[in-house]
Amino acid sequence: MKFTGLSAFPLTPLFDDHVDEQAFTRLVQRLAAAGVDSITALGSTGSYAYLSTEERSRVAKLAVEHAGDTPVVIGIGALRTSQVLAHADAAEAAGASGLLLAPVSYQPLTDEDVFELFRTVTEHSNLPVIVYDNPGTTHFTFSHDLYERLGALPGIASIKIPAVPADSAAAREHVQAIRARLPEHVSIGVSGDASAANGLNTGCDAWYSVIGGTLPEPALAITRAAQRGRAADAMAESERLAPIWELFAELGGSNRVVAAIAEHLGLARRSCLPLPILGLNDADRARVAAALERIGVSERSTS
Amino acid sequence: MKFTGLSAFPLTPLFDDHVDEQAFTRLVQRLAAAGVDSITALGSTGSYAYLSTEERSRVAKLAVEHAGDTPVVIGIGALRTSQVLAHADAAEAAGASGLLLAPVSYQPLTDEDVFELFRTVTEHSNLPVIVYDNPGTTHFTFSHDLYERLGALPGIASIKIPAVPADSAAAREHVQAIRARLPEHVSIGVSGDASAANGLNTGCDAWYSVIGGTLPEPALAITRAAQRGRAADAMAESERLAPIWELFAELGGSNRVVAAIAEHLGLARRSCLPLPILGLNDADRARVAAALERIGVSERSTS
């Protein structure tokens, strides 16, 4: 697979503390039908960190089975290296096309710890690996030096970077500085959905997208515009989604909001996130519903 | 059990990615023989977050079996509430006297999430629960309002607070402010070993101690001095351990240092922490050995 374009991150909805396989399958099928470039199951949005090895193995299989020709990437992060390797094996057995690996931490990790983790995984697995730089959840901060060391490892295919600066010149400089550290074949993917249009317009090859896992059409509109050099159209489409980005910023990140979106649209049942995460309260759910109305997404449009 | 005095946190040493049961058993036996007030197995120092449910259940059993009359507390934290409840059940089945629960997070948690987690656990389990406030690893910050709500739950026995201020008047004010929020029966235990003498001298009832899990004698000397009102002696004994506290501060926390201490003393085999945590490099291990020499701890003295 190519690690470019739109990689859509579906939720792994739970119901009564079990994976809601029907809801997950439907999300994957919708993404494949929408024409996303890849599906990354068991990303942060997919609650990988909360699921057992057995649940993760099952979700990986379901994702590949229902994605059709769309390549599937599987998140394999865990606190312990041996657990990560077990997840990598399960993903490979399921038929995944790539692996997403975040340096999840409880005790803070050093650069050497993280380098050795990625070295071990890339030596162990035949699948290409995306380096998942997500300091908001892993509490590990990558330096450009570490990007460079990791990018030189055979088996590293892409780096998923956090949000780029809002200013487009600053974003371009930021992306170029990372690009200069990486071999040609290692792609750079932006995350932080609100900054995705800017990231794609300023040199990122991919968008690792939370919203794309639940609302693939607007995410594809942004991605395709940017890929075709229509930077202003990409920015305009992103601007149209501002009510969603505002909720991400105001309600503590994308996770609870996107779960509430899926629940509102009937794509997941109420309380689809793993406890202790309660999800949004009713007042905030009303804001989500209003935002969806403003951007023209209704229950009907997703069926 | 009373949630006061010295609670010693042993490592759960690994060897070749398996729990080194012999080394763990020996650590527990040493703590019981030294006369600590309680043993908290599977704390942060005990790598609870990295171990499987089966490993944790086995470690809980070993701790209770080998602690003699010393009460054993078991850390039950996990990312998902259902996992926490399973760990609570296993701890109770093992014969534990109490539970230690940290609000471990991947997605950031809200106060409501954390309150409901503790409410669920205290309703579910018969064992008293210590609230584990460890923002360095959980990335959750407790407010005094949340302490108050949690302290009012039947089943909450103690709050393990982070390091107190270095200034003793400020520390006293800090501890009193927390005390004012809690019922009489809820104890306050200090962590952050370097601030323990100050914490005990300024109103904390307990010390939840990393160093006490590997070097119980000096930790007991501090604790007993403070309990008997000999504040200056407690401070002097803590000052004597300054070479250790300096390493904790300079080498990224207590975890790697205390593992290196145990390895140096023959209490655990090399690389006893779970990978990807590599542990200290040789230069830093030499500093650990020198610090131990300065405080008069040798391999022989631990045998």
Image (cartoon, coloured by chain):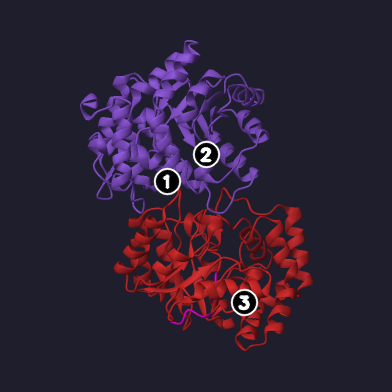
Chain colours: A purple, B red
Q: Residue at x 70, y 78 (%)?
A: B235
Residue A179 in the image: above or below residue B267: above
Q: Nearer the viewer, mark 3 or mark 2?
A: 2
Q: Are marks 3 and 1 in contact (CB under 8 Å)?
A: no
| Residue B205: x %, y % from top left | 54, 79
Q: Nearer the viewer, mark 3 or mark 1?
A: 1
Q: Residue at x 51, y 43 (%)?
A: A136
Dot 2 amino acid type: Asn
- Foreground: A10 or A264? A264
| Residue A195: x %, y % from top left | 50, 28
Query: Which chain hosts label 1?
Result: A
Query: Which chain hosts label 2?
Result: A
Residue at the spot of label 2: A134
Rendered image quadrant of residue B118 = bottom left
CA gap between label 1 and label 2 equals: 13 Å
Residue at the spot of label 1: A49
Dot 3 amino acid type: Pro
Dot 1 amino acid type: Ala
Q: Residue at x 37, y 57 (%)?
A: B112
